[in-house]
Image: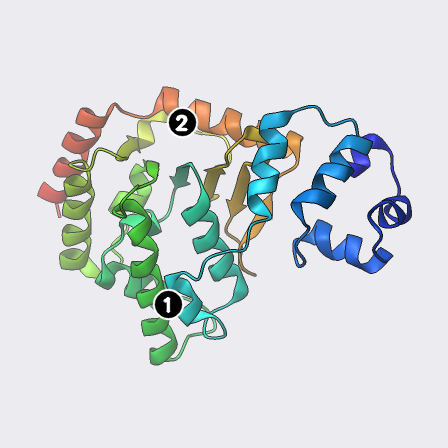
Amino acid sequence: MRTEAGLTAEYVAGLLGVDRGKISNIESGTRNISAERLRTLAAHCACADERYLSALVELTKPLQQHWWEEYRGKVSSGLLDIVELEWHASRLQTIQTVHVPGLLQTEDYARSVFAAVLPALPRLEIELRVAHRMGRQRVLDREQPVDYVAYVHEAALRMLFGGRDATRTQLNKLIAERERENVLVRVVPVERGSFPGAGHALLYAEGAVPQLDTVQLDSAHGPEFMHADLQLSKYRAHLEWMDKMSLPPDESRSFIRSIIHNL
């Protein structure tokens, strides 16, 4: 709001009665802002979008303690950011080209994924990450489960993480997930040819309003988060392409069964 209104951080600091450093901390998400100050800022920025403002006000409320707090200081802040992003999203969509989505992985499959990290992780670190990943799956079966759409490339289904038995168990789990009303798994066959963003894993988390959507990309250095309008527009188009080119749910299930049969 501040940048679109052309206001300097110094001006906003004076407007809200705080020092310049606090504005930077508020905007980077490391410090909270009161609902009153937020509405004052919105008024001076001529922000008339009440749905957007109400969603921002909701974010100013003190956060509850959640299960992942037990992992704070034990896993990277990036992994904690992912689980918090998933938990507070109104809808999740993911694209996976190398392995099946983390929220649908079995323990053995996830263990194999983490064991392939370079430099190699200690055994206890691997188990910690596996436990954290299994905990993330609570978002799918809590009292108000999040809607989850997973676009999985055929190549990911054929990767033998953990060997044939572990992969077979994993693929059977993907089929079983279809029984959940909030989970949709769709396959992109290799015969579809090239596709946008080939090789990149993507998580698109929808917020209470489109302005609060967030994209998370995997990288060798940890997760990257994007939320600029142009970035969101790009990845929305990416997901639309996947929706058009992936197999329908029933055909996707049959496709996965055929891979299991050939293992």
Residue type at mark 2: give it: Met
Q: Which mark is residue 129?
A: 1
The residue at the point 25 percent across, 59 percent down is: 109
Q: For residue 176, which quarter of the picture?
A: top left
The residue at the point 34 percent across, 52 percent down is: 102
Q: Is residue 100 left or right of residue 64?
A: left
Q: The N terminus is located in which quarter?
A: top right
Label 2 residue SS: helix
Q: Position of residue 146 (x, y in %)?
A: 34, 40
Up/down of 195 relative to 97, above or below: above
Which is nearer the eye, 254 or 39? Answer: 39
The residue at the point 40 percent across, 38 percent down is: 92
Q: Residue furthest left?
A: 261
Up/down of 60 relative to 66, above or below: above
Q: Residues within 10 Å of mark 1 (few under 14, many from 20)?
A: some
Q: Is residue 190 left or right of residue 256?
A: right
Q: Position of residue 89 (x, y in %)?
A: 45, 41
Residue type at mark 1: give it: Arg
- Nearest to N terminus: mark 2 or mark 1: 1
Which is nearer the eye, 28 or 175? Answer: 28
Which is nearer the eye, 210 or 173? Answer: 210
Which is nearer the eye, 114 or 106? Answer: 106
The residue at the point 40 percent across, 27 percent down is: 242
Q: Which residue is mark 2?
A: 242
Label 1 residue SS: helix
Q: Is residue 237 visible?
A: yes
Q: Is residue 100 visible?
A: no
Q: Could you give the CA–CA distance between mark 2 and mark 1, rounded to whole angstroms?
A: 29 Å
Q: Is residue 123 left or right of residue 10?
A: left
Q: Position of residue 132 (x, y in %)?
A: 35, 64
Q: Position of residue 47 (x, y in %)?
A: 73, 27
Q: Is residue 201 left or right of residue 23?
A: left
